[in-house]
Image: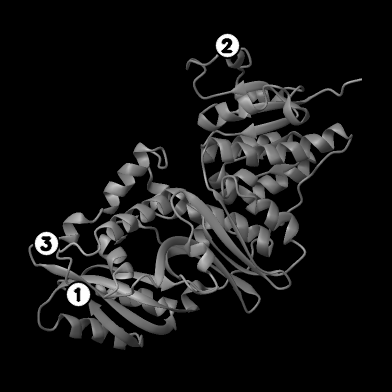
Amino acid sequence: MARKAVGLGMLGYGNIGREVFEYYRSGRDGARVVRIARRNMKTSAPASVRSLYTPARDLIRDPNVQVIIELTGDAKQGASYIIDALARGKHVVTANKEALATRWPDMMAAAAKGNASLGFEATVGGGMPVVRTMQRHIAGDDVEGFAGILNGTCNFILTQMKEYILRHLDDPQIQKRSLPLEDALAQAQKLGYAEPDPTKDVNGFDTKFKVAILAGLAFGGFVDPASIACDGILQPDLRIMPSDLYYLHHRRYLGGKYELKLVGVARRLGGRPALRVYPAFIDTSGDLADLATVRDSYNGIVIRSKRLGTQFIKGLGAGPRPTTISIASDVREIAGALLAGGNPTTSLGAKPASLRDADKLSTRGFIRSFSPDVKGVYAKKLEVLARHKVSVQSIVNVREFVYGADKSMPDYIEIDASPDGAVRDVLRDFRKLRGVRDPAYFRILEL
């Protein structure tokens, strides 16, 4: 006698929802979509989809729905649905990273109350099995740290800016031949790699939510995303400039020694992890060289643990197809247990994790700022650095790029290892200097 398929209810029917529905049309993995709720029920859809429409409240209460796939993309409403469903004993699979990262304790409490399971492989890394790796494979080891390129939009933008620079590297008019970040972002939006409103991607928040989720798994307990220091690639006081890529790759300067990537980093020091998100220089010949090779919209992560050493995972970081496979991996595990007569449950730490103050970490890297080549300006910068006891290795002025009526040019100050908080104080004081603008700090990635 054939076993009855596990009933799936979908909350949300956008690009990912359509792909998930098609995946399960044939009752794949012993599961079948039996109900669908979406924000606008009047939006056109195939008859096979419209026949399954029901309000979200009714879907959550439907006894024929055993597993709910939450794809609303709305952090507040999505979290409310997940918590309600879990508390009622419904198993949930979600791709909603912000909802999970910000409401982790509430979801764990609801899962315990309803004796239910929460699958969230799709919240980090698109099609990469990074959550399951952290949850299952590495769970028996002691994680020392991880560093990941976790946002495909930012990685695509930085890849395009770099490749444009490389094509015109020796052009005397390099500034006119370079690709501004805003233009690279427009390309990403045109190709579907960036949302119409890309703010959470480019300001690093998307990466921050993912770091919070992975850190919760790696170190145990709830990591509040608000506690993670975060710098993106396009913010009011920090933006990546074409000159940064030129300085990195021209043989007169760093000659390709480093790649520039937006990374989420966790480092366990003294038994407690310190977490950050920032644009980093990654050594192309060092221990993290694999991460430096991740390009376009791909994601990648290096995980270091006590007994397993260093592992590297790379894969498609977003998109309907990779995300659907991650969702399906969770559904398959839950459905398999249900069909076998079991009841999968989630039991993950919900107490706040103890974190180190990232400002006290030692860091080394390059401070960039723009200023006119006038007498005294460099002396003022050096005075600020000395006041905060940040030692200087070298100062390089990149004269191929000139901006504004005051003919400001970028300079890059390489610093010795210093407390991260001291470097942030330097940036703050640089912003107060007359004629100095757009200071930024590029940390050399260390794990």
On the image, which quarter does residue 342 sit in? top right
* Residue nearest the viewer, comparing 74 with 261: 261
Q: Which mark is residue 255?
A: none
The residue tagged with tag 1: helix, strand or loop? loop
Q: Is residue 309 left or right of residue 429?
A: right
- Mark 1 or mark 3: name the one nearer the start of the chain: 3
Task: Identify residue for label 3.
Answer: 404
Q: Amino acid at mark 2?
A: Ala
| Any part of residue 12 in sight | no
**In what quadrant of the picture does the N terminus appear?**
top right
Q: Nearer the viewer, mark 1 or mark 3?
A: 3
Residue 143, horizontal then vertical, whole percent: 67, 68
Query: Residue lying farthest left?
Result: 405
Q: What residue is shown with label 1?
A: 433
Q: Relative to residue 413, is residue 273 drawn left or right?
A: right
In this view, the residue in front, 179 or 393, is 179
* Circle 1 or circle 2, nearest the eye: 2
Residue at 66% x, 23% y is 59
Q: Residue at x 70, y 41 (%)?
A: 329
Q: Nearer the viewer, residue 365 or 420?
A: 365
Vertical relation: 99 (above or below) 85? below
| Amino acid carrying mark 1 in the image | Leu
| Residue at 62%, 18% in the rendered image | 54
Q: Looking at the rendered structure, which numbered label has been put on residue 47?
A: 2
Q: Quadrant of the C terminus?
A: bottom right
